[in-house]
């Protein structure tokens, strides 16, 4: 018998298969690691989920606190709007048409003070902060003629002009301006920049304001043949204490041919053909007997500081040298230039045009001491800061007047 011996076959893995296996394992490991800790991995998603839950929990707590506070306020009778939605005292006064029984200080949205005289309210078209021109309107005091007279608050001192509390300062004083008429070119020249020549603190001194080479003007407290300020020291003291004063929104307007009074309303025929002495008398008598405030013809401090105020907050930095002489209109609040742009800045009308206006400033020539300010509709050489001098009997068709209030 023949026996066949079979060899046992030994099985193994080839080198190629081993390499392939290792590569596959590495790929699987990479995928597993990425799924666990990668950008979109399980661990990362778990962390983000925890953060979302934490934020949601905190937000929920905030909202619950708001509801709790609201309920507490409601139960205590203190249900208030959010602070950012709350109206300022000025905005409330405009909205509600509040008529003030006493001289009252209220504040705009930037916390600037505005002192409102008794018998007045804020006009519906008033600015909401002092940089825009706060308009007060005579609501109760006086007769039917004086009701509705409007004035603009001119702030002095530090004025906040935005929500950040940034400040610009308006100093009460007499100024000269970089503004002039060039007779050779027949054009107005300059930058309009203001330079203080006399501060409010030294008002008692006789200080000359040079204009060109020969004109010298002063603000006298006594001894002039024209009408000087009622009480310049009283005006300055009260304006500084109140943080401002009021200037007529418009030039003086005629009242049905009545030469014994005037009004300060839009759309009236301008009161012209009046001399400086009579203009001062009318301005002072408009609220005669009123113990809450004083009225007077505008002085050079009030005029110059109003220009500085306009140039600071209207964006029209050269307003002092502007002119609207081509408007050809003598109606209050309607004067405009050839481009049909109304002459209004910070809610104050017609300083750069329509008619010039008498003031209590005095020219050094004893024969011509009466000083008018501003530009008019028939004189190309005049401009906002311009000064002209005339006799006390001069009653032209291109000069009116503007009153002030201080309290």
Image (tube, grey):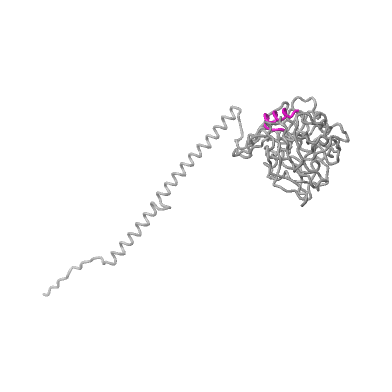
> 250 or 278: which is nearer to us?
278
Q: Position of residue 154 (x, y in %)?
A: 70, 36
* Location of residue 129 in the rendering, given as x and y in whole percent from the top left corner: 67, 37
Q: Which quarter of the picture shows residue 139? A: top right
Position above or below: 37 against 232: below
- Is 240 covered by the magenta stretch? yes
User: Which quadrant, please, contains the C terminus?
Assistant: top right
Give the total number of marks visible in the rendering. 0
2 lies above or below 397: below
Image position, residue 267 (x, y; %): 82, 40
Residue drawn 74% across the image and 41% down it: 211
43 in the magenta segment = no
Regarding residue 146, the answer to whether it shows in the image is no
| Residue range (magenta) | 231-245
Res 77 → quadrant: top right
Main structural element of the magenta stretch: helix, strand or loop? helix
Q: Position of residue 389 (x, y in %)?
A: 80, 39
């Amino acid at each position: 018998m023949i026996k066949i011996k079979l060899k046992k076959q030994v099985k193994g893995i080839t080198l190629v298969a081993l390499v392939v296996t290792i590569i596959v394992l590495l790929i699987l490991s990479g995928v597993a690691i990425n799924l666990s800790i990668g950008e979109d991995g399980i661990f990362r998603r778990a962390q983000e989920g925890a953060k979302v839950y934490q934020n949601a929990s905190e937000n929920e707590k905030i909202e619950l606190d708001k509801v709790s506070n609201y309920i507490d306020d409601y139960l205590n009778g203190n249900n208030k709007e959010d602070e950012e939605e709350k109206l300022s005292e000025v905005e409330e006064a405009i909205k509600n048409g509040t008529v003030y029984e006493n001289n009252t200080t209220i504040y705009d949205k930037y916390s600037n003070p505005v002192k409102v005289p008794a018998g007045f309210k804020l006009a519906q078209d008033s600015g909401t902060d002092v940089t825009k021109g706060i308009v007060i309107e005579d609501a109760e005091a006086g007769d039917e003629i004086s009701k509705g007279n409007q004035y603009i608050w001119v702030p002095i001192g530090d004025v906040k002009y935005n929500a950040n509390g940034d400040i610009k300062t308006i100093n009460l004083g007499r100024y000269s301006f970089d503004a002039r008429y060039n007779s050779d070119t027949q054009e107005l020249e300059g930058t309009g920049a203001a330079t203080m020549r006399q501060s409010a603190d030294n008002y008692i001194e006789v200080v000359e304001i040079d204009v060109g080479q020969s004109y010298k003007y002063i603000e006298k407290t006594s001894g002039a043949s024209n009408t000087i300020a009622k009480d310049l020291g009283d005006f300055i003291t009260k304006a500084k204490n109140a943080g401002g004063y009021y200037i007529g929104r418009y030039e003086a307007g005629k009242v049905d041919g009545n030469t014994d009074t005037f009004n300060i309303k839009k759309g009236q025929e301008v009161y012209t053909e009046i001399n400086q002495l009579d203009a001062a008398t009318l301005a002072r008598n408009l609220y005669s007997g009123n113990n809450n405030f004083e009225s007077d013809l505008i002085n050079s401090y009030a005029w110059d500081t109003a220009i500085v105020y306009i140039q600071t907050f209207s964006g029209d930095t050269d307003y002092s040298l502007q002119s609207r002489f081509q408007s050809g209109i003598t109606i209050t609040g309607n004067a405009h230039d050839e481009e049909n742009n109304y002459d209004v800045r910070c809610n104050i009308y017609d300083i750069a045009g329509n008619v010039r206006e008498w003031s209590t400033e005095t020219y050094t020539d004893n024969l011509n001491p009466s000083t008018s300010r501003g530009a008019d509709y028939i004189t190309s050489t005049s401009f906002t800061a311009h000064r002209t001098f005339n006799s006390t009997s001069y009653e032209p068709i291109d000069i009116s007047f503007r009153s002030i209030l201080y309290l």
